[in-house]
Every structure is written in C-alpha cells, then in structure tokens.
Image: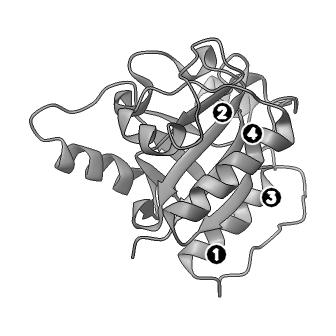
C-alpha cells in the first residue's frame, strides 16, 4: 500500500440518484425520436418530398424567418420551389446530416454538410433534412459508415449536435465552450 493509498483509502461513492430507465421495448426509430424530443428537438415525419416542402414552409412562417442559408446544392430542389435565396447572414441554416444516432439521439455531421466551419459559427437555428436510412445505433457505426462510404477522401470536421435547447445552461464545467446546442427542426423523410 503506497502513501496515497493510505490517505485516500476510503472510496468515494457517487451520490445516490434514482436511475431513470427508458423502456427497452421501443424500436430504434422510436427510441431516437423519443430521446430527440426529450432533449428539446422538434421532429417532423415526412412520407413524401411534398410534405417536406409543406413543413419547411410552415417552419419558416411560424418563426418569421424570411431567409435561410445552406451549403448543400441538393437542397435547392426544396428552396427554389419555395422561392428562397441563399442568404449567408440568415437566422436559420438548412442542411442534411451524415447520420442520426440512436444511443444519444444526436445528429452526426461532417465537412460534407458544414465545410470546414465549426458548428458554433453557424446560426442558432437549424433545419435538418434526413432520411430513415441514415439511422444508426452508435457513433462508432456512424464513423465506420462515413469511412466506408468515402474511402478515397474521408470528410473532416466530423461533429455532432446532441442538445436542442441552446439557452439551457449546462452545469458540467467540462462542457464549457464545447456546446454544439442548436434550436433544431428535424424533417425525417421516409426512404425505406
């Protein structure tokens, strides 16, 4: 027994906190959506691209957002139909994502969506278009999938948004300055 062992012989036990167990009978889609909503995300399920357009229009109207910015040119099929112009200084950013992660109800992004700009430099408001086939259980699976799909040129700037209440204060000092919290709308398009 060393010197420090004799001083710190008594083990410190974590405070007794009731464990909140989530139901395990939910399928992965339901688990993701439940966790996403519990964290403050706004979820909209779409069966068709027409529904995506309708929800997108309603979101902009509800929040009085007159413009958006986006980097992914594939999203032009939605924005041009709504008559929107890409405005860098907009209050809302419209994007896709790499994957939806079930284990912590987070969204995984890369330089394919964000370029080399950190999440903290984007507007507080995000609208994300994703498909049901992007749902994976863990971040490890998400990273493996990215590596597999982009073998020749693996994207950089891989980041996750896991909190959807940007004004909520996190008491954990280890997260200070490292919050990727966004006011996030998720338009989930069925593709399976």
Q: Nearer the viewer, mark 2 or mark 1?
A: 1
Q: CA separation, marks 4 and 1?
A: 26 Å
Which secondary structure, mark 2? helix
Report the number of discs. 4
Q: Which mark is residue 38?
A: 3
For residue 66, side relative to residue 171 (left or right): left
Could you classify mark 3 by the number of other residues whose Cα lies within 10 Å: few (under 14), some (14-19), or many (20 or more)?
few
Residue holding disc 1: 30
Rendered position, 84 above or below 12: above
Residue 173 falls in which quadrant of the image?
A: top right
Could you classify mark 2 by the number of other residues whose Cα lies within 10 Å: few (under 14), some (14-19), or many (20 or more)?
few
Q: Name the spot of residue 74 as percent of width and height, x first.
A: 37, 40
Residue holding disc 4: 60
Could you classify mark 1 by the number of other residues whose Cα lies within 10 Å: few (under 14), some (14-19), or many (20 or more)?
few
Q: Earlier in the sequence, mark 4 or mark 2?
A: 2
Residue holding disc 2: 5
């Amino acid at each position: 027994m060393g010197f420090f062992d004799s001083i710190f012989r008594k083990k410190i036990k974590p405070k007794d906190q009731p464990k909140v167990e989530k139901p395990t009978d939910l399928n992965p889609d339901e688990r993701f959506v439940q966790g996403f909503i519990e964290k403050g995300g706004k979820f909209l399920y779409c069966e068709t691209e027409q529904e995506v357009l309708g929800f997108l229009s309603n979101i902009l109207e509800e929040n009085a957002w007159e413009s958006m910015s986006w980097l992914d040119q594939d999203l032009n099929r939605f924005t041009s139909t709504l008559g929107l112009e890409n405005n860098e200084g907009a209050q809302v950013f419209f994007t896709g994502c790499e994957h939806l992660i079930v284990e912590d109800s987070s969204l995984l992004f890369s330089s394919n969506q964000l370029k080399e700009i950190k999440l903290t430099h984007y507007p507080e408001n995000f609208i994300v278009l994703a498909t049901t086939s992007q749902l994976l259980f863990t971040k490890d699976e998400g990273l493996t999938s990215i590596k597999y799909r982009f073998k020749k040129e693996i994207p950089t700037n891989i980041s996750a948004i896991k909190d959807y209440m940007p004004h909520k204060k996190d008491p954990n000092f280890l997260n200070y300055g490292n919050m990727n919290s966004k006011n996030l709308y998720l338009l989930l398009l069925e593709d399976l």
